[in-house]
């Protein structure tokens, strides 16, 4: 059985930051804009949490392409949402 490198289990801060933003982005993208105020709120939240995440994901995938654990985590996200 192949031993894993313990450092592969540690999620780097840049990946954690991306995950937090993209998870919030995905949450707000899935919400219903049932009235004008809600639509405005959702648009603001998506601008805050979604903007730049397509590029961030691409950059992180390149940076961590040699780390299977991180790559597998990043591959769960849609590549193009903006």
Image (spheres, rainbow, N blue to C red):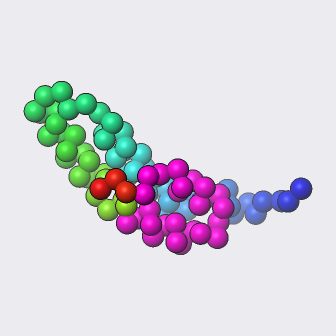
- x, y (%) of residue 40? 14, 40
- Whether residue 64 is situated above or below residue 69 in the rendered picture: below
- Whether residue 44 is situated above or below residue 63 in the rendered picture: above
Q: Residue at x 37, y 66 (%)?
A: 55
Say left or right for 16 vs 68: left
- x, y (%) of residue 56? 40, 64
Q: Residue furthest top?
A: 34
- Whether residue 54 is situated above or below residue 35 in the rendered picture: below
Q: Residue furthest right?
A: 1
Q: Residue at x 78, y 60 (%)?
A: 4
Q: Quadrant of the N terminus?
A: bottom right
Q: Residue at x 37, y 43 (%)?
A: 26
Q: Quadrant of the C terminus?
A: bottom left
Q: Is residue 60 magenta?
A: yes
Say left or right for 78 vs 68: left
Res. 67 image quadrant: bottom right
Q: Which residues are magenta?
A: 55-79
Say left or right for 4 vs 26: right
- x, y (%) of residue 35? 13, 28
Number of numbered discs present? 0
Overall secondary structure of the magenta section: helix
- x, y (%) of residue 19? 46, 52
Q: Residue furthest left?
A: 36
């Amino acid at each position: 059985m192949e031993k894993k490198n313990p450092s592969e289990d540690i999620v780097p801060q840049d990946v954690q930051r991306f995950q937090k933003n993209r998870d919030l982005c995905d949450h707000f993208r899935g919400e219903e804009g049932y009235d004008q105020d809600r639509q405005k709120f959702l648009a603001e939240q998506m601008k805050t949490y979604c903007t730049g995440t397509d590029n961030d994901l691409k950059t992180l995938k390149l940076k961590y392409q040699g780390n299977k654990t991180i790559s597998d985590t990043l591959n769960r996200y849609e590549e193009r949402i903006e």
